[in-house]
Image: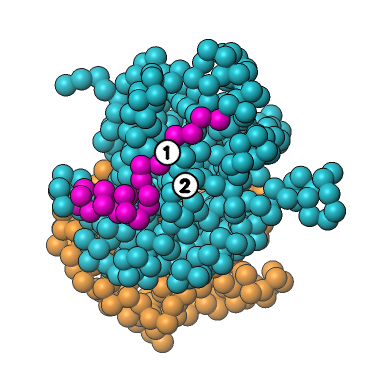
Chain colours: A cyan, B orange
Amino acid sequence: MTDSLQAATGPYFGDFGGRFVPEALVAALDELADAYDKARVDPAFSSELERLARDYTGRPSIVTEVPRFAAHAGGAHVFLKREDLNHTGSHKINNVLGQALLTKRLGKTRVIAETGAGQHGVAAATAAALMDLECIVYMGEEDTERQRLNVARMRLLGATVVPVKTGSRTLKDAINEAYRDWVANVDTTNYLFGTAAGPHPFPTMVRDFQRVIGLEARAQMLDLGALPDAVVACVGGGSNAIGIFDAFLDDAEVRLIGCEAGGDGVDTGRHAAAIGGGRPGVLHGSRSFILQDADGQTIPSHSISAGLDYPGVGPQHAWLATLGRAEYWSVTDAEAMEAFGLLCRTEGILPAIESAHALAGAMRLGRQLGPDATILVNLSGRGDKDVETAAVYFGLLDGGES
Amino acid sequence: MSGASDRIRHSNAEGRAALIAYLPVGFPSVERSIRAMVAMVDAGADVIEVGIPYSDPVIDGPTNQIAAEAALLAGARVADCFAAVRAVVAAGASAVVMSYYNPLLQYGLEKFAGELAAAGGSGVVLPDLTPDIAQEWLAAAEAHSLDTTFLVAPSSTPERLHMTVAATTGFVYAASLMGVTGERASVGSQAERLVRDSRAAGAHLVCVGLGVTTGAHAREVATYADGVVVGSVLVRCLIDHVNEDQALDALRTKTSELARGVRGES
């Protein structure tokens, strides 16, 4: 045995993870975990997933050096792992293709999904269309309003989008509603969970399906000359971050930096930084860092980015944070939007606002490390869905910039 | 032995099932929720399940969600459950607390168990904690002689039924169907089999909940279960009537109907 941190199998990651769910869901989670354990060692499953990654998603995604952007990051060498170029526009497709294939193996005909920004919902609707599955997407009502285009995209793809009107009307409430659906329809239905959080086996399984990002990127960086000094990714639930971190976990010289959504600033209380501003607790089936009050009631998160607007974080990130193997920074709305605007204007790449949090982290890190540093950023998604939010933010809609 | 279990056995000795009635503390206010629980005791409830409202109630349907959300908005705290437990016990019924896990975890499991026992509560019902991960809670409960009710579901495998029944102290809660709490037109058809299987796995007391809405439902469930758990339709009385007197009237009427049901009367 080695002391490798890679591909940890769960259900626990140190003190985090586990499976805190109603008994009614245990059989379904056991069934899913069992199917996944068989599939992961089945060459037929792997080769089908690889074929879809190549011929449908468009993998491997490229790595792009961005020198004009990097001039604002202390002149460091900055490289972007271009998950934004995947079919459907983000890393989410990597995970849903795997889970949809598993759904077929389970003999189920219906999938449900939660979505915040809509990227996971769009990916789930896409995979469902491809594999002839009925698809229901739960989305907080507030998110359906700020991500209207993605709602339309999901409907075009044949999915039913259900606006969730309870609680804070955002991602956490969409997850609650998806669980409620699953309990009632578990015989026919598989839950395509969008991030590396929730009860076992989701944190492990989603991480494994996203692991391809880091495996590719590590080899691509070596081809370019050397491993980077740091890998930076945004963290909401944390699936794109754990996907790119995993392959680098045993490279002790590579710093791993997760950028949580700092909203208006962690000290204002209006943020989504579960590690930076939360404490351990149980939410949505696993023990991790969460935003909560003294009574354990979840505190609604805030972020300009719907995809990071979640009061919890995946348990493997909580573990890596307590081990000190990864660092978790918080990036405010304003910092993220500055990086968003810069990448648009300096490189002609429109990032998702989620990914802009990682870009802002890279700017901060580059200024600390200087021009000798090499920084790899996971550009987890593209920003087409964010044009309206950004246009309002920058005042571009009614006659010019403010 | 525990208050709730004794009460259920006592009811069974009378040739009937026990009526276990749920309301969340703090809806529409702490004081009014406590008066509502006492009204249910007066109208024939044997055991009151005092709910702790939670921000993310994944196994609850719309009715209980509305009440929990309103209770939290009105400022309900975890510790408010102790006053409710005291009032229920003073009114002559047994009290158990129903809570999702995180509020208890953050309060401190040992502290919560001690204060619940001191208030006269006899146990807890834990909808999102299963026995295989409940060691910390079970230790705290044992130290304060509290019973722990776990849930079994129609999807529970024989192995899990045995494990759950073995870990349960007090009564086993059998979910009548695969779904969330809420009023329904009929009680799940799988409930009777689940009660039979739970008994075969060694359970002494099995109570059935989820979807029990009418006196007729209670009468039907009472033919095969030791107790009948009712929640959403009682919460509905408080949602539908803003005026407190009207709400309490509706609650007494519904509780009496259910109390007749568990006695096999219509």
Residue A72, relative to residue A306: is it above or below?
Answer: above
- Residue position for label 1: A62
In the figure, residue A67 lies in which quadrant?
top right
| Residue A271 picture location, percent across and down | 64, 38
Residue located at (49% from left, 62% from top): A138
Residue stretch rendered in magenta on the structure: A45-66
Residue B97 seen in the figure: no
Crowd tier of the residue under label 1, counting other residues whose Cα lies within 10 Å: few below 14, some 14–19, many 20 or above = some
Q: Is residue B60 left or right of residue B154?
A: right
Q: CA distance from mark 2 to mark 1?
A: 8 Å
- Residue position for label 2: A85
Residue A148 seen in the figure: yes
Residue located at (76% from left, 45% from top): A394
Pick the front one: A144 or A91: A91
- Is mark 2 in CB contact (under 8 Å) with mark 1? yes
Dot 2 falls on a residue whose secondary structure is helix
Pick the front one: A27 or A326: A326
Looking at the rendered structure, whether the residues under marks 2 and 1 are on a common chain is answered as: yes
Q: What type is the residue that disc 2 sits on?
A: Leu
First in sequence, mark 2 or 1: give its number.
Answer: 1
> Label 1 is found on which chain of the structure?
A
Q: Is residue A259 left or right of residue A264?
A: left
Q: Is residue A386 magenta?
A: no
Q: Residue A114's mark?
A: none
